[in-house]
Image (cartoon, grey):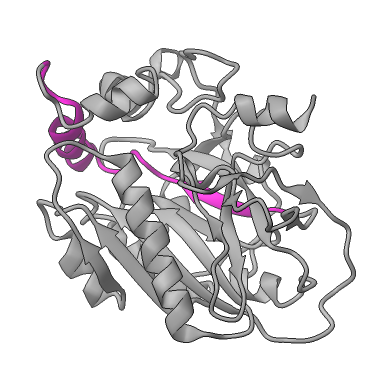
Amino acid sequence: MTRDELVSLRRFGAVLDGYSANIPTVAHLPPRTSGEPVLCAVIGTWFEGDVIAATVRNCFANGCTRVLVVDNDSPDETKEQAVAAGATIAADYRTELYDDTLRLRTMNDVAAAATAELDVPELWWLSLDADEFPCGPDGQPVLQYLQSLHEQYSVVGADVIDLYPSGPETYMPGDHPADRMPLGMRHPTDQTYCLRGHWKHPLLRAARGRLQLRQPRGSHTPFSRPDFGQTLEPPRPLVVFHAPFRNKDVAARRLRALCGGDNRRRSAGDDASTGGRGAITRWRSLDAVYAQRWSDVELYHPPGKLGRVVGVSLCPWQELVNLTAFPRW
Protein backbone atom coordinates (compact mmCIF):
# COMPACT_ATOMS: atom_id res chain seq x y z
CA MET A 1 0.00 0.00 0.00
CA THR A 2 1.47 3.36 -1.01
CA ARG A 3 1.63 6.44 1.19
CA ASP A 4 -0.87 8.22 -1.09
CA GLU A 5 -3.28 5.31 -0.68
CA LEU A 6 -2.92 5.54 3.09
CA VAL A 7 -3.70 9.25 3.02
CA SER A 8 -6.77 8.66 0.83
CA LEU A 9 -8.16 6.27 3.44
CA ARG A 10 -8.23 8.93 6.14
CA ARG A 11 -11.96 9.57 6.38
CA PHE A 12 -11.87 11.52 9.62
CA GLY A 13 -8.99 13.97 9.16
CA ALA A 14 -9.52 17.72 9.36
CA VAL A 15 -8.25 19.93 6.54
CA LEU A 16 -5.50 22.18 7.95
CA ASP A 17 -4.39 25.08 5.78
CA GLY A 18 -0.85 24.59 4.50
CA TYR A 19 -0.47 21.24 6.23
CA SER A 20 -0.91 17.68 4.97
CA ALA A 21 -0.91 14.22 6.52
CA ASN A 22 2.52 12.97 7.47
CA ILE A 23 2.13 9.21 7.96
CA PRO A 24 4.55 8.18 10.75
CA THR A 25 7.32 5.68 10.16
CA VAL A 26 8.47 3.43 12.99
CA ALA A 27 12.18 3.91 13.66
CA HIS A 28 14.40 1.76 15.90
CA LEU A 29 16.63 4.39 17.47
CA PRO A 30 18.98 4.05 20.45
CA PRO A 31 18.01 5.42 23.87
CA ARG A 32 18.14 9.16 24.53
CA THR A 33 21.63 10.62 24.77
CA SER A 34 20.90 14.13 26.01
CA GLY A 35 18.24 16.63 26.94
CA GLU A 36 15.21 16.54 29.20
CA PRO A 37 11.72 16.65 27.65
CA VAL A 38 8.84 18.71 29.01
CA LEU A 39 5.26 17.40 28.72
CA CYS A 40 2.05 19.46 28.49
CA ALA A 41 -1.53 18.53 27.61
CA VAL A 42 -4.38 20.17 25.75
CA ILE A 43 -7.90 18.78 26.21
CA GLY A 44 -11.04 19.57 24.20
CA THR A 45 -14.21 19.56 26.31
CA TRP A 46 -17.98 19.92 26.14
CA PHE A 47 -20.36 18.71 28.89
CA GLU A 48 -17.70 16.60 30.65
CA GLY A 49 -18.21 17.61 34.29
CA ASP A 50 -18.31 14.05 35.61
CA VAL A 51 -14.93 13.03 34.22
CA ILE A 52 -12.78 16.08 33.46
CA ALA A 53 -11.25 16.32 36.95
CA ALA A 54 -9.98 12.75 36.65
CA THR A 55 -8.69 13.44 33.13
CA VAL A 56 -6.75 16.50 34.30
CA ARG A 57 -5.32 14.69 37.31
CA ASN A 58 -4.27 11.82 35.08
CA CYS A 59 -2.33 14.26 32.92
CA PHE A 60 -0.45 15.57 35.94
CA ALA A 61 0.15 12.01 37.17
CA ASN A 62 1.72 11.32 33.76
CA GLY A 63 4.19 14.16 34.24
CA CYS A 64 2.49 17.14 32.58
CA THR A 65 3.61 20.56 33.81
CA ARG A 66 0.60 22.32 32.25
CA VAL A 67 -2.88 21.12 31.34
CA LEU A 68 -4.81 23.47 29.05
CA VAL A 69 -8.53 23.07 28.42
CA VAL A 70 -10.35 24.26 25.30
CA ASP A 71 -14.05 24.34 26.21
CA ASN A 72 -17.03 24.69 23.89
CA ASP A 73 -19.26 26.59 26.36
CA SER A 74 -20.12 23.53 28.44
CA PRO A 75 -23.61 23.71 29.99
CA ASP A 76 -22.47 21.97 33.17
CA GLU A 77 -19.60 22.33 35.66
CA THR A 78 -16.86 21.16 33.25
CA LYS A 79 -14.78 24.34 33.49
CA GLU A 80 -15.08 24.59 37.26
CA GLN A 81 -14.09 20.95 37.75
CA ALA A 82 -11.13 21.33 35.38
CA VAL A 83 -9.81 24.40 37.19
CA ALA A 84 -10.28 22.76 40.60
CA ALA A 85 -8.13 19.86 39.37
CA GLY A 86 -5.34 22.25 38.32
CA ALA A 87 -6.05 22.95 34.64
CA THR A 88 -6.14 26.32 32.91
CA ILE A 89 -9.06 27.27 30.67
CA ALA A 90 -7.06 28.38 27.64
CA ALA A 91 -10.08 29.01 25.40
CA ASP A 92 -13.84 29.12 25.89
CA TYR A 93 -15.97 29.52 22.79
CA ARG A 94 -19.65 29.13 21.88
CA THR A 95 -21.24 27.42 18.88
CA GLU A 96 -24.83 26.45 18.11
CA LEU A 97 -23.75 23.15 16.55
CA TYR A 98 -20.75 20.95 17.25
CA ASP A 99 -17.92 22.26 15.06
CA ASP A 100 -14.98 19.87 15.08
CA THR A 101 -12.90 21.95 12.68
CA LEU A 102 -13.14 24.97 14.97
CA ARG A 103 -12.33 22.84 18.01
CA LEU A 104 -9.21 21.42 16.34
CA ARG A 105 -8.03 24.78 15.07
CA THR A 106 -8.44 26.24 18.54
CA MET A 107 -6.61 23.36 20.25
CA ASN A 108 -3.74 23.58 17.75
CA ASP A 109 -3.53 27.37 18.15
CA VAL A 110 -3.52 27.10 21.95
CA ALA A 111 -0.73 24.52 21.87
CA ALA A 112 1.32 26.57 19.38
CA ALA A 113 0.98 29.75 21.47
CA ALA A 114 1.95 27.95 24.68
CA THR A 115 4.92 26.37 22.88
CA ALA A 116 6.21 29.79 21.88
CA GLU A 117 5.69 31.09 25.42
CA LEU A 118 7.53 28.21 27.09
CA ASP A 119 10.35 28.14 24.49
CA VAL A 120 12.07 25.01 25.79
CA PRO A 121 14.43 22.76 23.79
CA GLU A 122 12.03 19.80 23.72
CA LEU A 123 8.30 20.03 24.46
CA TRP A 124 5.75 17.26 23.90
CA TRP A 125 2.02 17.90 23.55
CA LEU A 126 -0.52 15.32 24.66
CA SER A 127 -3.77 16.02 22.78
CA LEU A 128 -6.81 14.42 24.38
CA ASP A 129 -10.56 14.23 24.51
CA ALA A 130 -11.98 14.45 28.02
CA ASP A 131 -12.68 10.71 28.19
CA GLU A 132 -9.13 9.57 27.30
CA PHE A 133 -6.60 8.32 29.87
CA PRO A 134 -3.09 7.58 28.52
CA CYS A 135 -0.08 5.87 30.05
CA GLY A 136 3.26 4.55 28.82
CA PRO A 137 3.54 1.12 27.13
CA ASP A 138 4.40 -0.59 30.44
CA GLY A 139 1.99 1.53 32.45
CA GLN A 140 4.70 4.03 33.40
CA PRO A 141 3.98 7.78 33.32
CA VAL A 142 4.14 9.22 29.82
CA LEU A 143 6.96 11.62 30.75
CA GLN A 144 9.05 8.73 32.05
CA TYR A 145 8.60 6.97 28.71
CA LEU A 146 9.58 10.12 26.81
CA GLN A 147 12.73 10.42 28.91
CA SER A 148 13.89 7.13 27.41
CA LEU A 149 13.24 8.06 23.77
CA HIS A 150 15.83 9.34 21.33
CA GLU A 151 15.40 13.03 20.59
CA GLN A 152 14.78 12.39 16.87
CA TYR A 153 11.33 10.94 17.50
CA SER A 154 8.59 13.42 16.64
CA VAL A 155 5.35 11.53 17.32
CA VAL A 156 4.14 8.65 19.50
CA GLY A 157 1.28 6.35 18.52
CA ALA A 158 -1.27 4.73 20.81
CA ASP A 159 -3.27 1.55 21.17
CA VAL A 160 -6.77 2.46 22.34
CA ILE A 161 -8.76 0.31 24.77
CA ASP A 162 -12.47 1.15 24.71
CA LEU A 163 -13.94 0.58 28.17
CA TYR A 164 -17.56 -0.38 28.70
CA PRO A 165 -19.62 -0.16 31.91
CA SER A 166 -20.80 -3.24 33.78
CA GLY A 167 -23.98 -1.51 34.95
CA PRO A 168 -25.85 1.83 34.93
CA GLU A 169 -23.81 3.27 37.83
CA THR A 170 -20.35 1.84 37.24
CA TYR A 171 -18.20 4.97 37.28
CA MET A 172 -17.20 6.97 40.36
CA PRO A 173 -16.37 10.57 39.34
CA GLY A 174 -12.77 11.41 40.16
CA ASP A 175 -11.48 7.86 39.68
CA HIS A 176 -9.57 6.32 36.81
CA PRO A 177 -12.25 4.63 34.66
CA ALA A 178 -10.12 1.49 34.20
CA ASP A 179 -10.47 0.91 37.95
CA ARG A 180 -14.26 0.96 37.62
CA MET A 181 -14.86 -0.64 34.23
CA PRO A 182 -13.48 -4.19 33.95
CA LEU A 183 -14.67 -4.83 30.39
CA GLY A 184 -13.11 -3.53 27.23
CA MET A 185 -12.01 -4.10 23.66
CA ARG A 186 -9.10 -2.92 21.58
CA HIS A 187 -10.45 -0.36 19.14
CA PRO A 188 -10.30 -1.93 15.68
CA THR A 189 -7.52 -0.55 13.51
CA ASP A 190 -6.17 -0.76 10.01
CA GLN A 191 -3.27 0.94 8.24
CA THR A 192 -5.18 4.15 7.63
CA TYR A 193 -3.23 6.28 10.09
CA CYS A 194 0.17 4.58 10.16
CA LEU A 195 1.76 1.38 8.92
CA ARG A 196 1.62 -0.11 12.44
CA GLY A 197 -2.14 0.46 12.57
CA HIS A 198 -2.13 2.74 15.61
CA TRP A 199 -5.60 4.23 16.07
CA LYS A 200 -4.26 7.51 17.44
CA HIS A 201 -1.07 9.55 17.64
CA PRO A 202 -1.77 11.81 20.62
CA LEU A 203 1.83 12.88 21.33
CA LEU A 204 3.55 15.48 19.13
CA ARG A 205 7.00 16.98 19.66
CA ALA A 206 7.87 20.67 19.52
CA ALA A 207 11.32 22.22 19.77
CA ARG A 208 12.75 25.65 20.53
CA GLY A 209 9.41 27.36 20.79
CA ARG A 210 8.01 25.99 17.50
CA LEU A 211 5.22 23.45 17.14
CA GLN A 212 5.55 22.35 13.53
CA LEU A 213 3.03 19.50 13.69
CA ARG A 214 -0.74 19.80 13.96
CA GLN A 215 -3.42 17.40 15.15
CA PRO A 216 -6.33 16.46 12.86
CA ARG A 217 -9.69 15.11 13.94
CA GLY A 218 -9.26 12.42 16.57
CA SER A 219 -5.47 12.89 16.76
CA HIS A 220 -5.20 10.07 14.25
CA THR A 221 -2.35 11.18 11.96
CA PRO A 222 -0.06 14.19 12.46
CA PHE A 223 -0.14 16.97 9.88
CA SER A 224 2.93 18.94 8.84
CA ARG A 225 4.15 21.42 6.27
CA PRO A 226 5.96 19.95 3.25
CA ASP A 227 9.42 20.94 4.52
CA PHE A 228 9.10 19.20 7.89
CA GLY A 229 10.49 15.83 6.80
CA GLN A 230 9.33 12.37 7.86
CA THR A 231 7.64 11.94 11.24
CA LEU A 232 9.26 9.14 13.25
CA GLU A 233 7.60 7.14 16.02
CA PRO A 234 9.04 4.59 18.45
CA PRO A 235 8.18 0.88 18.13
CA ARG A 236 6.22 0.78 21.39
CA PRO A 237 3.01 2.85 21.53
CA LEU A 238 1.18 4.41 24.45
CA VAL A 239 -1.92 2.79 25.89
CA VAL A 240 -5.00 5.01 25.98
CA PHE A 241 -8.06 3.98 27.97
CA HIS A 242 -11.19 5.46 26.39
CA ALA A 243 -14.36 5.74 28.48
CA PRO A 244 -17.21 7.49 26.62
CA PHE A 245 -19.90 5.53 28.51
CA ARG A 246 -19.78 6.25 32.20
CA ASN A 247 -22.89 6.43 34.41
CA LYS A 248 -26.09 6.10 32.41
CA ASP A 249 -27.91 9.19 33.67
CA VAL A 250 -24.94 11.43 32.81
CA ALA A 251 -24.36 9.75 29.45
CA ALA A 252 -28.05 10.07 28.58
CA ARG A 253 -28.16 13.80 29.39
CA ARG A 254 -25.04 14.52 27.40
CA LEU A 255 -25.98 12.42 24.36
CA ARG A 256 -29.53 13.76 24.35
CA ALA A 257 -28.19 17.32 24.28
CA LEU A 258 -25.76 16.40 21.51
CA CYS A 259 -27.73 13.96 19.34
CA GLY A 260 -31.37 14.14 20.41
CA GLY A 261 -34.08 15.62 18.19
CA ASP A 262 -34.60 15.25 14.49
CA ASN A 263 -34.13 18.86 13.38
CA ARG A 264 -30.95 20.90 13.87
CA ARG A 265 -29.55 18.58 16.50
CA ARG A 266 -26.20 19.74 17.82
CA SER A 267 -24.37 16.82 16.22
CA ALA A 268 -25.87 17.34 12.73
CA GLY A 269 -22.70 18.55 11.04
CA ASP A 270 -20.59 15.89 12.68
CA ASP A 271 -23.09 13.19 11.72
CA ALA A 272 -22.80 14.29 8.10
CA SER A 273 -18.98 14.39 8.11
CA THR A 274 -18.66 10.92 9.68
CA GLY A 275 -21.44 9.27 7.70
CA GLY A 276 -23.44 8.80 10.89
CA ARG A 277 -20.67 6.79 12.56
CA GLY A 278 -19.58 9.23 15.25
CA ALA A 279 -21.26 10.28 18.50
CA ILE A 280 -24.73 9.46 17.19
CA THR A 281 -23.81 5.76 17.24
CA ARG A 282 -23.45 6.06 21.03
CA TRP A 283 -26.89 7.67 21.25
CA ARG A 284 -28.38 4.83 19.23
CA SER A 285 -26.58 2.25 21.40
CA LEU A 286 -27.24 3.84 24.80
CA ASP A 287 -29.87 1.40 26.07
CA ALA A 288 -28.05 -1.63 24.67
CA VAL A 289 -24.80 -0.65 26.41
CA TYR A 290 -26.34 -0.37 29.86
CA ALA A 291 -28.43 -3.51 29.37
CA GLN A 292 -25.20 -5.26 28.30
CA ARG A 293 -26.71 -6.39 25.01
CA TRP A 294 -23.30 -6.33 23.39
CA SER A 295 -24.48 -7.82 20.09
CA ASP A 296 -26.71 -4.73 19.60
CA VAL A 297 -24.04 -2.12 20.40
CA GLU A 298 -22.82 -0.15 17.40
CA LEU A 299 -19.09 0.52 17.19
CA TYR A 300 -18.36 4.22 17.23
CA HIS A 301 -15.81 5.58 14.76
CA PRO A 302 -14.96 2.27 13.07
CA PRO A 303 -11.94 2.28 10.74
CA GLY A 304 -12.83 3.55 7.30
CA LYS A 305 -12.72 0.18 5.55
CA LEU A 306 -15.11 -1.55 7.96
CA GLY A 307 -18.27 0.44 7.30
CA ARG A 308 -21.04 0.25 9.89
CA VAL A 309 -20.30 -2.30 12.62
CA VAL A 310 -22.94 -3.63 15.02
CA GLY A 311 -21.88 -5.89 17.87
CA VAL A 312 -18.87 -5.60 20.14
CA SER A 313 -16.81 -8.40 21.66
CA LEU A 314 -15.62 -7.61 25.17
CA CYS A 315 -13.26 -9.20 27.67
CA PRO A 316 -11.44 -8.09 30.83
CA TRP A 317 -9.20 -5.30 29.60
CA GLN A 318 -6.21 -6.88 31.39
CA GLU A 319 -6.27 -9.55 28.67
CA LEU A 320 -5.64 -6.88 26.04
CA VAL A 321 -2.66 -5.00 27.46
CA ASN A 322 0.24 -6.11 29.63
CA LEU A 323 -0.16 -3.57 32.42
CA THR A 324 0.24 -4.36 36.10
CA ALA A 325 -0.07 -0.70 37.10
CA PHE A 326 -0.64 2.74 35.60
CA PRO A 327 -0.52 6.32 36.97
CA ARG A 328 -2.84 7.19 39.85
CA TRP A 329 -3.42 10.41 41.76
Residue 192: horizontal and vertical position, in percent?
A: 65, 30
Please tell me which residue is depicted at 76% across the width and 55% down the height of the picture. Answer: 236
Residue 127 left/right relative to 143: left
Residue 94: horizontal and vertical position, in percent?
A: 13, 51
Q: Is residue 174 visible?
A: no
Q: Quadrant of the C terminus?
A: bottom left
User: Is residue 46 located in the magenta-colored stretch of the structure?
Assistant: no
Q: In this view, does 98 lie above or below 311?
A: below
Q: In this view, does 235 lie above or below 165?
A: below
Q: In this view, does 196 lie above or below 237?
A: above
52 or 208: which is nearer to us? 208
Q: Is residue 261 visible?
A: yes
Please tell me which residue is depicted at 52% across the width and 66% down the height of the picture. Answer: 125
Q: What stretch is highlighted in magenta?
A: 237-262
Residue 162: horizontal and vertical position, in percent?
A: 50, 38
275 or 79: which is nearer to us? 275
Residue 70 left/right relative to 206: left
Residue 12 left/right relative to 101: right
Please tell me which residue is depicted at 70% across the width and 39% down the height of the picture. Answer: 194
186 or 319: which is nearer to us? 186
Please tell me which residue is depicted at 64% across the width and 69% down the height of the picture. Answer: 140
Residue 86 left/right relative to 116: left
